[in-house]
Each structure stands twice: as structure tokens, then as C-alpha cells.
Image: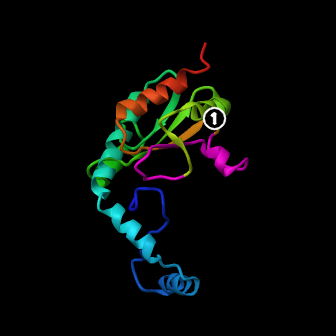
Amino acid sequence: YLNGHSDMIGGALVASQRDEFWQGLADIRHDGGAVLGAFEAWLLLRGMRTLYPRVEAACRNAQAVAEHFHDHAEIVEVLYPGLPSAPDHALAARQMRGGFGGMLSLRVRGGEARAIEVAANVKLWSRATSLGGVESLIEHRASVEGPDTPVPGDLLRLSCGIEDAKDLIADLERALAIGIS
């Protein structure tokens, strides 16, 4: 999310106190040279300048997608803390300000093959394993993790970007309609 353009990897690791655990992390960073190069630092700074509007748009889009597909005939379940029906909605509402995040998951009726088919037939969503960019992404997580994953085969992971929510919803609707008789 900090960079927002899916063109670099970086982040921060924070510890609550300077103890043995912290020192181990500091040693790994020092010995491994885990610091950003100048160009990556510039990319991160560029992205952070637009962090607020990007996260705001992603949260708004994820909420709209979750609400739209919550009672959809082709969706078994929507996993998103912004839905009042979510098991931890009250906790999320207390902890999250200004939205419930840009990530959500849909469990597609018809199982793993159907979920893979839906992911393959979207046009606006990009099929990728990433999150927090300006573009909306979709992935069939079980395919990424392999046969031993506990992730259900019917689950699609979505990372909402800054596109118009109506367009994102329409693209998913179109992909869900393919192959239904």
C-alpha cells in the first residue's frame, strides 16, 4: 500500500521494545543489507504522497463490491469486515477508521473449477499476487499456495484499486455469468 504502484518491495518492521528479538531483527537487516536503494526509496516516497486518496478509494471500492455480492446467487460467501454480518464486524468498526480495507474474498458457488473460471474471465481486474496498488487484482489463492493449502478452492482474493466501483462490479458480474446456463 505504501508504494501503491506495484513496482517495488519495501516496508517497515516494528518492535515494541529493544530486546533480544529486536536485536536479532537488527542483525539480520545489517548482515543481509536489507535497506532500500535510492531509486526504491524514491518510488516509495512518490507512492506515499498519494497514500490517503488511494487507500480511501480502495476501501470505498471494497465496501461496494462486498455489499453488491453479499446476497448474490453465484457467491457462497463474502469475507469482508465491513459487512455487518462479518463475525468480527464490531471489532473492526472499533479499530478501523475511514473504511475496512481494500482486500476482500469471494467464495464462488460451483467450487474450485468455477472460481478459476471466473478469475480467468475478468477483463478489468488483473490476475496477480499482490495487493495495495492502484489497479484492482484478483487471484485464485489456492492455486498460488498449492495442494496442501488450507485455503478453500472456491475462494478468490480481491485487492481493490482506484477504478470506479461500478466498473469493477460489472466486470465480476460478467465473469460470473460466463458458463451459466
Q: Position of residue 177 (x, y in %)?
A: 54, 20
Q: Is residue 73 above or below residue 131?
A: above
Left or right, 76 with reference to 17: right
- Between 46 and 84, the one nearer to me in the picture: 46
The kind of residue tagged 1 is Ile
Outermost residue toward the top in this view: 181
Compared to residue 6, the image places residue 117 above or below, namely above
Label 1 secondary element: helix
Query: In this orientation, which residue lies closer to the viewer: 155 or 44?
Result: 44
Task: Report the predominant secondary structure element of the magenta stretch.
Answer: loop
Residue for point 67% across, 31% down: 113
Give the image's coloring scheme.
rainbow
Residue 151 locus on image (x, y percent): 62, 45
Number of callouts in the render?
A: 1
Quadrant occupied by the C terminus: top right
Residue at the image position 41 percent from the left and 72 percent from the top: 41
Magenta region includes residue 133: yes
Spot the residue most to the right.
147
Q: Report which quarter residue 180 is drawn in.
A: top right
- Residue furthest front in the image: 39
Please give the residue where the numbered disc 1 appears in the rendered image: 116
| 61 to the left or right of 130 | left
- For label 1, count other residues whose C-alpha is less than 10 Å away and answer few (under 14), some (14-19) or many (20+): many
Q: Is residue 90 visible?
A: no
Measured as percent of width and height from the top left, residue 11 is found at: 44, 69
In which quadrant of the rendered image does the N terminus lie?
bottom left
Report which quarter residue 52 is drawn in.
bottom left
Question: Is residue 157 among what the camera can see?
Answer: yes
The percent position of residue 118, horizontal first and vertical second, equals 58, 30
Which residue is pictured at 35% across the width and 49% down the height? Answer: 92
Q: What residue is drawn where x is 65% and y is 49%? A: 144
The magenta segment is 130-152
